[in-house]
Structure formats: structure tokens, C-alpha cells
Amino acid sequence: MIKIALLFPGQGSQYTMMGKALYESSPEVREIFHRTNEILGYDLLGIINEGNLEKLTRTEYAQPAIFAYSYAIFQSICKEKQFFPSFMAGHSLGEFTALTCAEVFRYEDALRLVMERATIMQQATSDGFGGMAAINGLHPLLVEEECDRVSNGEDKIVVANYNSSNQVVISGANSLVKVATENLAKIGAITIPLKVSAPFHTPYLELSNQMFQRAIAQTQMAGLKWPVISNVDAKPYYHPAEIRDRLNVQMTSAVRWKETIDYMLRQGVNTFIELGPKTALTNLIKRDFSHVRAYSYEDNYEQIMSIIDEQVAEKRPSVVSRSLGIAVCMRNENWDDAEYQKGVIEPYRKIQALGNKLEEEGREESFEDIKQAIEMLRSVFVTKKVPLEEQKERFTQIFDETKKRHLFDDFAPIMFAEKEVVNEK
């Protein structure tokens, strides 16, 4: 069974003229960039296409450019194909793209967040103070030790990204980044300075982070259409409150990318598709996991289209799988731990085990299997205090997507029962 994860890159993947062919060929993409220009107040595509890489590399332009281009790729594919991703994840900035594609944020709201994030990160330190460098070929612990050794009371560097088993990124004061990269190169590391203009994911951005928290607090969020993995702890989000909490510290926390990929692999993901400029995330996976399929939009467009077709032909999503996905994504309005354990966690784990069993046995779900999944989802809805109208929309969505609308009436008594599941003894 094909289980797809969509990946969205972060800053550093930008290049001039990116997205030009897509923009010229797609009216939908042109509309996205038109809306983008209206919100930003300047011609973003003009900056991308004018050929000035130094200007495009500035955080205030790079982040909106990568975000808009990655989102446009996702929308252009959705226009052609129906996606059934198991997970989404984004690297640093890319996490905002993932959340937007998962419909947590409206595009316009997310773009404003990205614009705010980019501006305050650009202003976090004076030009030339902060820097970052990729360190390849050494165990992360050795790099951590070097960062601790060269840091002092005034200036410091830290590991900002744990990208793979043999690549991390260090970030901090430029003078110390230079010393650390020279020292690490002497013991076998391959070091690559990154094209960024501030020391991202370090304590230097604490003031910027506090400013950004106010922007997050003012931004509306919805339930996730698909699960998204957090950079901060490499775990999936379950409801908007968790998204706010983790985004509130994302700017100053290390990106746990290797753990993110490990988590998705443990959940059965076997195909990774990178939607954005260049191939950085695809290359990281290929280096660590030669048995896993990993493709980038820019290099493997035809293969990606074929894989999506293959997944659709292979199997429509089941009621069990869609119920699990929706249960994870619904926002929570119930903060009673005991009720949440009984009404959400326990029934979810039961149906998760059922889904794993169905996959292992390779059999279609039975009427009884569907009944159990619907009972679980009803319990989750009631416990999380999801409005009845939204419950009806979600149940309709499940039976439409799985092509089992003919069973809808059979399960209506379960789906729209009036009793409170959490109060059952």
C-alpha cells in the first residue's frame, strides 16, 4: 500500500526564476501570485524573476517567495489529482506551508504570518552578525560538543537543525560559526555556509519570537484536513491549541527533522514527495533511507503524477482510515483529562489497531469494522465538543471520499445519536 507524506522546504532553497514555468502555464498559480502581491504590497514574482539572488536571499523576501511557490505547487497538483497523503511536514518555514495546505490557515492569513515572521527575523540581529552552516559527516553529539566549547558568555552557537543521521546545521554568531566550521572540518566534516541573513532557531531570536507570538494569537485556525508533524517535538498536531503552543516556540527551538522522518516511517509511510524549490529534503531522505521512495516536484514531476494515480487506483481511502484522520484533526474544546482519555484516546487507539490489522491482512473493511470506526469518531466528536453541523459535514465527507455513500443511512443512528458518549458508564 502506498502511504504518502508531503514535505515542504524552508529558507535556503530559494533561487531566481523559481516557479516561472508553473506561473506561465497555470491560471490558478497566476491568481495565487496576484493575491500574494496584493497582500504583500509589492511584486513578489518580479523579485523572484529579476535575477538578483542576493536580494531574494534576504529573509523578508525569501520566506514569502518559498511559501507562495510551494503552496502554488500543491494547489496546481490538487487541480489535476486527488491527494490522499497520510502526513504533511515542513522544515522550519515549511511547517507553515504544511499547515496551510492542511487547511489550518487560510492562505491570506498564513501569508501575513509568514510576512510578519520574515520581517522580524530579518530584524533580529544586525547585518553580518548571525550565520548558519551545514555540517556533514559527523555525529550530532560531536557537533553539539564543539558548539558548547566555542560558545562564551557573550556569543554562542547551537545546533539549529537535526536534519539527518550525519547532517546538522549550526547557527549563531557569525564569528563563532566560522571558528566551529574550521575546527569541525579538521576532524572530517564537510561544511557548507548557508545563504541566510540571521541566526535562525537560536536564543538570539527570543525577542522576535515574543513579537511573533502576538501575531499567532490573532490568527484564526481550523481543524486539520490531514495530520501535520511539528518541528518542535516531531509529533503530530491534534488540535489548534497545540499548534499555537508549538509555533510559539518554533522560532527559537531546533528543527527535529530526522525524528520527524523517523516518526512517519514508523507509521508506515513509504513515499515522500517534496513540494517546493530544489531537492534538499528529498536528498536528506535518500542519504539515510535508500529503500524509501523520495521525489521532488522539480526533478520528478512525471513520477509523482504516476504515484498519485497508482495510489488512487490501488485503493480508495477506507472509512476506518478516514475516521482516524479526521479524529486526529478535529479541534478540542474539552480540557477534562479523564473525559479526553475515555472518549478520545482509548477509542482512537482501538480503531488504530484495527486499521493496522486490516492493512497487515490485506482485506477490505467489513460492515462491523465500519461500525466500530464510526462509533469511535462519534465518541471523539462528542468528547471534543464538535458542533453538530460540523459533525454532519465530516461524516458526509467520509462516505463521499470512500465512495460508500450508499451506507450513509445505515450508520445515521450511530452518527447522529443524541446521548453524550462521555457520560456513558
Image (cartoon, grey):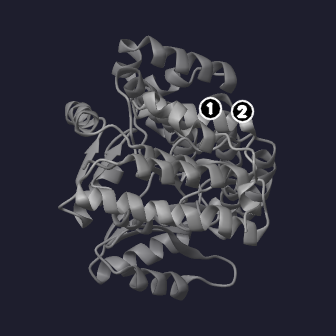
Q: Which residue is mark 1?
A: 393
Residue at 45%, 35% in the rendered image: 70
Look at the picture and state if 341 lies above or below 52: below
Extreme residue toward the top, this view: 27
Q: Secondary structure at mark 2?
A: helix
Q: Nearer the viewer, residue 379 or 50?
A: 379
Circle number at residue 41:
none
Residue 309 visible = yes
Q: Is residue 126 left or right of residue 74?
A: right
Numbered label tally:
2
Instruction: Report which quarter residue 269 is drawn in.
Output: bottom left
Three-letter code for the amino acid on which mark 2 is drawn: Glu
Which quadrant of the figure contains the C terminus? bottom right
Q: Is residue 168 left or right of residue 350?
A: left
Q: Which residue is mark 2?
A: 389
The answer for how far apart the CA atoms under marks 1 and 2 are is 6 Å
Residue 52 visible = no
x, y (%) of residue 117? 67, 46
Residue at 59%, 44% in the rendered image: 224
